[in-house]
Image (cartoon, rainbow, N blue to C red):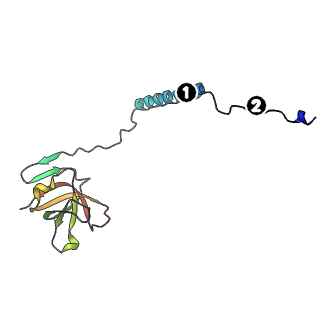
Amino acid sequence: MPEDLVQPITPISTSPPKSLLFGGAIAVVISGAVVGFILTKIPGLGKNVKGSSATIVNTATEVGSTDTQTFRDSAQGTLESGGLNGEGTHKLIRDGGPSQTVYIISSIVDLEQYAGSKVQVWGETIKAQRAPWLMDVGRLKILE
């Protein structure tokens, strides 16, 4: 009689068939494409995004972007090569001592061309770890 109480257990598959998974993945991709297509056809959607209408200036005394909304901070002084502990590629030496030095970088202006010159720069102040003032320069004007 104890032999009747023990019966083998037949394994039950808990994973869905692979064809069902593949079909579900195809349905998700197709529905995403359809929704994307529909969203592109809705008038006025995304039209409030403002693009920059700034131009690039390149004269004998001034170089860089005319975008005054992005590059609204300014400073003037003598441009020198070198940053502070890896922050900035150049520095702007200003009156008032080392605490007034602006450490700068730029992806628009080749700052090395103006090293040693007295300049005015316009840029955007960015967060620094060590430098008291770190600026991404967008425009540079030679003063002397």
The total number of labels drawn is: 2
Which label's residue is closer to the chain start, 1 or 2?
A: 2
Q: Mark 2 points at which residue?
A: 10
| Amino acid of disc 1 | Phe
Q: Give the range drawn in magenta.
A: 126-133
Q: Distance between the residues labelled 1 and 2?
A: 27 Å
The residue shown at (16%, 46%) is 56
144 relative to 138 in the view: left or right: left
Query: Based on the displayed image, in which of its 4 quarters is residue 82 positioned?
Result: bottom left
Q: Is mark 2 on a helix, strand or loop?
A: loop
Is residue 128 shown in magenta?
A: yes
Image quadrant in which the C terminus is located: bottom left
Is residue 107 positioned above or below 95 on the image? above
Toward the viewer: 123 or 128?
128
* Mark 1 touches mark 2? (CB < 8 Å): no
x and y, in percent, of residue 102 in the image: 21, 65
Q: Nearer the viewer, mark 1 or mark 2?
A: 2
Q: Mark 1 points at which residue?
A: 22
Task: Name the mark on residue 122.
Answer: none
x and y, in percent, of residue 14 in the image: 68, 33
x and y, in percent, of residue 51 in the image: 29, 43
Is residue 97 positioned above or below 86 on the image? below
Toward the viewer: 8 or 137?
8
